[in-house]
Image: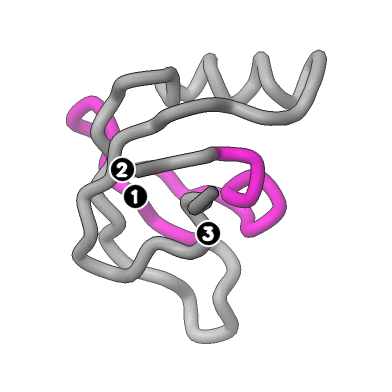
Amino acid sequence: MKTLKEAKVGDTVRIVKLHGEGAVKRRIMDMGITRGVEVYVRKVAPLGDPIEVNVRGYELSLRKVDAEMIEVE
């Protein structure tokens, strides 16, 4: 299982599954990150947190903790 946190800068990955429960999972889905969506990893902060991605035509910053809950292929 590969997570969004493990994706490298410049990779385009597809969301396979969202882990987590309740409000955390709902918040991630509300940001437009749902199964089947392609996500482009734009850049990663110097210390690795946050990760900046392009999803559904807009830029989004995710914490490492949230990125670990997103399974990709």
Q: Secondary structure under badge 3? A: helix
Q: Does residue 67 belong to the magenta stretch?
A: yes
In the foreground, 8 or 62: 8
In the foreground, 24 or 68: 68
In this view, the residue farthest toward the bottom is 46
Q: Secondary structure under badge 2? A: strand
Q: On the rendered structure, is 14 left or right of 24?
A: left
Picture residue at 30% right of the left edge, 56% below the top: 41
The reply to whether callout 1 and callout 2 are in contact (CB within 8 Å) is yes
Q: Amino acid at mark 2?
A: Glu
N-terminal label among 1 and 2: 1
Please give the residue where the numbered disc 3 appears in the rendered image. Answer: 5
- Residues at marks 3 and 1, CA–CA distance in whole angstroms: 11 Å
Q: On the rendered structure, is 48 left or right of 55?
A: right
N-terminal label among 2 and 3: 3
N-terminal label among 3 and 1: 3
Please state which of the two labelled residues, at mark 3 or mark 1, is closer to the viewer: 3
- Residues at marks 2 and 3, CA–CA distance in whole angstroms: 16 Å
Please give the residue where the numbered disc 1 appears in the rendered image. Answer: 53
Please give the residue where the numbered disc 2 appears in the rendered image. Answer: 59
Picture residue at 47% right of the left edge, 60% below the top: 51
Q: Amino acid at mark 3?
A: Lys
Residue 68, image x and y in percent?
63, 50
- Magenta stretch, residue numbers: 51-70
Q: On the rendered structure, is 53 left or right of 47?
A: left
For residue 45, above or below residue 35: below
Please state which of the two labelled residues, at mark 1 or mark 2, is closer to the viewer: 1
Q: On the rendered structure, is 23 left or right of 56?
A: right
**Circle 2: is it few (<14), some (14-19), or many (20+) Cα within 10 Å?**
few
- Residues at marks 1 and 2, CA–CA distance in whole angstroms: 6 Å
Picture residue at 44% right of the left edge, 25% below the top: 33
Q: Does residue 59 belong to the magenta stretch?
A: yes
